[in-house]
Image (tube, grey):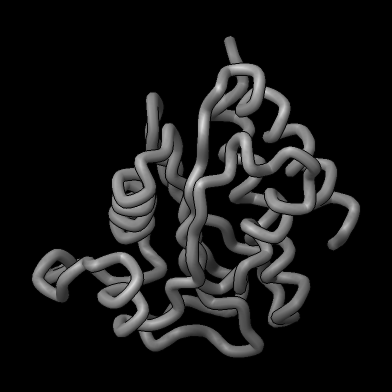
């Protein structure tokens, strides 16, 4: 676990625990790093409900029960798809928050024309938003870590009390 992921996970865990809120994760090209970071913090069972690496359409159906019809006209690695994943994982786990990530870690882009280093992240809960990240890098591991950090940062912005 890199230091930045550990720092962000610690920062996210504090308001989640203090507010007695929970999170569920649906991630793709970050390969489980978002969940691993959240679970690396002692006391994670107070806020982490579960999640999965939703890497293929088969996984999307088997793990999230999202039928093909729900994604008609929507492509993965897009903000609408990231929002669908975040909403669905939140609902499935009965969590306060759902966070999702879907992109192309590299070293090549995806079949939709997105370059390596492209991902979309969404947070769903009392506030909801999606964003697109472009690292400009073909370094798969660095992109995976950057995607996980961006997702944790987005979740932190959502859960911090104003």
Comparing 133 with 151, the one in front is 151
- Displayed quadrant of residue 78: bottom left
Tell me the quadrant of the picture where the N terminus can be found.
Answer: bottom right
Residue displayed at 68% across by 70% down: 144
Residue 148 location (% of width, % of height): 66, 58
Q: Residue furthest right?
A: 3
Q: Look at the picture and state if 160 lies above or below 53.
A: above
- Expressed as whole percent of the image width and height from the top left, the position of residue 139 reads 75, 80
> Where the C terminus falls, by quadrant?
top right
Pick the residue in front: 94 or 156.
94
Residue 107: where, in percent of width, then height?
A: 65, 88
State whether residue 127 is above or below residue 61: above
Please tell me which residue is depicted at 30% across the width and 52% down the height of the picture.
88
Q: Residue furthest top?
A: 162
In this rendering, does residue 131 appear at all?
A: no
> Looking at the picture, how far across and down is residue 81, in whole percent?
31, 60
Residue most extreme to the left: 69
In the image: residue 132, left or right of residue 128: right
Quadrant of residue 147 within the rendered picture: bottom right
Along the horizontal axis of the image, is 10 left or right of 100?
right
> In percent of the image, x 12 and y 70: which residue is there?
72
Q: Taking 69 as reference, is 86 above or below it?
A: above
Image position of 21 (left or right of 1): left
- Picture layout, residue 17 above or below residue 111: above
Q: Is residue 66 left or right of residue 31?
A: left
In terms of depth relative to the viewer, which is nearer, 52 or 43?
43
- Residue located 36% across and 79% down the image: 59
């Amino acid at each position: 676990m890199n230091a930045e992921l550990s720092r962000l996970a610690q920062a996210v865990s504090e308001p989640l625990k203090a507010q007695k809120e929970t999170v569920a994760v649906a991630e793709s090209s970050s390969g489980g790093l978002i969940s691993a970071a959240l679970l690396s913090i002692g006391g994670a069972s107070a806020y982490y409900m579960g999640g999965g690496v939703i890497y293929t359409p088969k996984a999307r159906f088997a793990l999230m029960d999202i039928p093909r019809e729900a994604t008609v006209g929507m492509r993965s690695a897009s903000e609408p798809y990231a929002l669908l994943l975040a909403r669905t994982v939140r609902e499935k786990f009965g969590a306060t928050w759902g966070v999702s990530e879907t992109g192309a870690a590299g070293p090549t882009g995806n079949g939709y024309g997105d370059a390596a280093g492209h991902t979309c992240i969404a947070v769903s809960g009392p506030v909801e938003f999606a964003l697109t990240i472009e690292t400009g890098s073909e370094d798969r591991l660095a992109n995976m870590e950057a995607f996980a950090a961006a997702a944790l940062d987005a979740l932190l912005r959502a859960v911090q009390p104003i």
